[in-house]
Amino acid sequence: MQDSLYTHAMTTTALHIVCPHCHTTNRVQSADLQRAPDCGSCHQPLFAGAPLALDGASFDKHVGRSQIPVLVDFWAPWCGPCLQMAPAFAQAARQLEPRLRLAKLDTEAHPQIAGHYGIRSIPTMILFKDGREAARVSGAMSSGDIARWVQSVL
């Protein structure tokens, strides 16, 4: 029942979707998400089926402005488990987009954001919904486990 309510709401509303290329906020009818919409500004696809690399400015735009959930993988290039999970996270992006955006934030390059969210171990994934943290999990996961975890908290 809850899933059908989510599906109904997703098919009847316009959503703000931030472009992964130029970071412009686009209004997209939720029913059009499955039709591979393009950005109205740069005309690139709004969903590429791959995680988006975030920096300080783009983090705030994607987490704060997107009206679809954003799953952020907090990682670092020296972290073995992070590197092992990267292909699974990429596969999860192909499975879960456009229902949500998957993104990565390098905690070594952007320690202020990691500190703001209290990241103590990596990899840590935080699911943001409506600009706020909805759930978090730490440790490397398979793509199937990522998808199941996301679906359990949405």
Image (cartoon, rainbow, N blue to C red):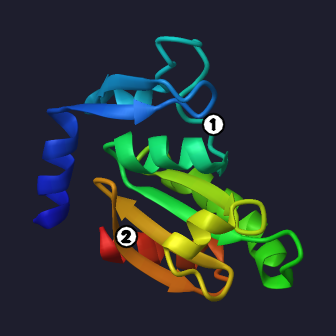
Give the position of the C terminus as an image quadrant: bottom left
Rounded to the nearest whole Å, what is the CA distance between mark 2 and mark 1?
Answer: 20 Å
Q: Secondary structure at mark 2?
A: helix
- Which residue: 38% across, 76% down? 135
Decide which of 135, 60 is in the foreground and name it: 60
| Mark seen at residue 48 | 1
From the top left corner, tell me how far across and down residue 9 is, in percent: 14, 44
| Structural crowding at the residue carrying mark 1, measured as other residues with C-alpha within 10 Å and reported as few (<14), some (14–19) or many (≥20) | some
From the top left corner, tell me how far across and down residue 119 is, in percent: 58, 81
Decide which of 115, 59 is in the foreground and name it: 115
| Structural crowding at the residue carrying mark 2, measured as other residues with C-alpha within 10 Å and reported as few (<14), some (14–19) or many (≥20) | few
- Which residue: 51% across, 11% down? 41
- Which residue: 49% across, 74% down? 117
Which residue in the protein does label 2 denote?
A: 151
Query: Which of the marked residues, 2 or 1, is nearer the chain's N terminus?
Result: 1
From the top left corner, tell me how far across and down residue 95 is, in percent: 55, 55
Taking the image as shown, residue 104 lies to the left or right of residue 131, namely right
Give the position of the N terminus as an image quadrant: bottom left
Kind of residue indicated by mark 1: Ala
Q: Secondary structure at mark 1?
A: loop
Kind of residue indicated by mark 2: Gln
Q: How many marks?
A: 2
- Which residue: 59% across, 79% down? 124
